Amino acid sequence: DRSPRASSCSGKALCLRLCFDGGSRGNPGVAGAGAVLYDADTDATLWQGHRFVGRRATNNVAEYEGLLLGLQAVVCHFANSAQMTVQGDSHLVLNQMMRRWPVKADHLKPL
């Protein structure tokens, strides 16, 4: 959903919205990930990127890679931004990042 929305930011210079996704064909299989950074107030695209994750990666790893790709872009290009919201379709990743669910898979812990 790219419709304009009210920002939850509190008057800071720039408020970002990070949208990420990842997927694999076969699970595990060939996988890729992507992320887009929007200005949360204007919905303007500020940055977008994608990466090849691997020939034998799980869907969960691809989802994490999408999140990491977006977070790396924030650090590199928008480090002075005060606030950011994160959107993704992976309940696993989002709930683990909010510490609602534990990260059980050892191979996901370093991500």
Image (spheres, rainbow, N blue to C red):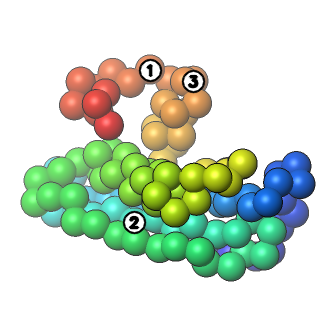
The answer to whether 34 appears left or right of 110 in the picture is right
Amino acid under label 1? Pro
Residue 78 percent location from the top left of the image: 58, 59
Residue drawn at (47%, 73%), measured in percent from left and top? Answer: 48
**Which numbered mark, 3 or 2, is in the foreground of this view?**
2
Image quadrant where one finds the N terminus: bottom right
Front in this rendered view, residue 104 or 43:
43
Residue 25 percent location from the top left of the image: 22, 63
Please tell me whether mark 3 sits on a helix, a strand or a loop.
Answer: loop
Residue farthest to the front, as pictured:
80
Q: Tell me how far mark 2 sits from mark 1, CA to CA.
A: 24 Å
The answer to whether 20 appears left or right of 33 in the picture is right
Residue 30 percent location from the top left of the image: 16, 63
Amino acid under label 2? Gly
Front in this rendered view, residue 9 or 59:
9
Residue 63 percent location from the top left of the image: 38, 51
The answer to whether 19 appears left or right of 60 in the picture is right
The disc placed on residue 34 is: 2
Name the residue tied to disc 3.
Answer: 100
Front in this rendered view, residue 99 or 36:
36
Q: Tell me how far mark 1 sits from mark 3, CA to CA.
A: 7 Å
Residue drawn at (57%, 66%), measured in percent from left and top? Answer: 37
